[in-house]
Amino acid sequence: MNAITPMLKDQDKLSALASRYVDVEDLPWKPSGNPGIDMKVLLKDEKTGLMTCLFRWAPGSALPMHRHVQIEQSWVLEGELEDDEGVCTKGNFVWRPAGSSHVARSPKGALILAMFLEPNILLDDANAGKRLE
């Protein structure tokens, strides 16, 4: 199996078909590479790029221009996530089609559950071509 939860305790002791119960509180926050945005990787498949993450956005943080290689799904658990097309508020969901691009911002801060079939590609001058992983 290629899918894992990084930092999951005793994962190596589980059989290939065993359920993975993830105590999200126990997982460490790690920097996303973008100031003010930290993440917890809940599920990651290195081979396909499939990834489910919890993102913590500090007030005023932004993710620079990036392209969604495949569909991106985001459920806002706290706060707000916005771009030039609209605002997704607490309890609401937004998904973006493959090939779309935008700058995402969180003026008030947010906690977001995001699901990717493949990581986004950054398009800003400082990070052009880098994948968000």
Image (spheres, rainbow, N blue to C red):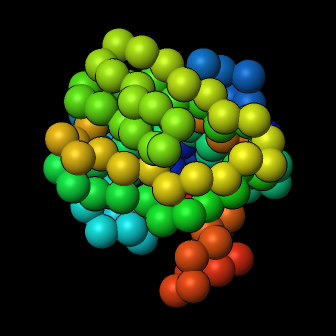
At x 30%, y 32%, the residue is: 80
Where on the picture, by quarter, is residue 108?
top left
| 17 sits left or right of 75 in the view | right
Q: Quadrant of the N terminus?
A: top right
Asked where in the image residue 52 lies, by quadrant, the reply is top right
| Image side of residue 128 versus residue 41, left or right | right
Question: Residue 121: where, in percent of width, then height?
Answer: 67, 64
Q: Is residue 92 above or below residue 95?
A: above
Q: In the orientation shown, which residue stands out farthest toward the top?
A: 91
Question: Is residue 23 something that shows in the picture?
Answer: no
Q: Nearer the viewer, residue 97 or 77?
A: 97
Whether 64 is drawn above or below 87: the answer is below
Question: In which image quadrant can residue 60 be found?
Answer: bottom left
Residue 41 located left or right of residue 80: right
* Quarter of the image that includes the C terminus: bottom right
Residue 31's x, y, as percent?
34, 64
Q: Residue furthest bottom?
A: 126
- Work out whether residue 133 or residue 67 is closer to the camera in this orientation and state it: 67
Residue 7 location (% of width, % of height):
43, 50
Give coordinates of residue 20: x percent, y percent. Answer: 55, 25
**How many numbered marks, from 0 up?**
0
Residues 114 and 41: in front is 114
What residue is at 28 percent from the left and 57 percent from the top? Answer: 61
Q: Report whether 103 appears left or right of 72.
A: left
| Residue 63 in view of the camera | yes
Q: Residue at x 50, y 56 (%)?
A: 103
Tell me if residue 16 comes above or below residue 45 in the rendering: above
Give the camera-side residue of 84 and 121: 84
Residue shown at 64% from the left, 72% from the top = 123
Q: Is residue 35 above or below residue 39?
A: below
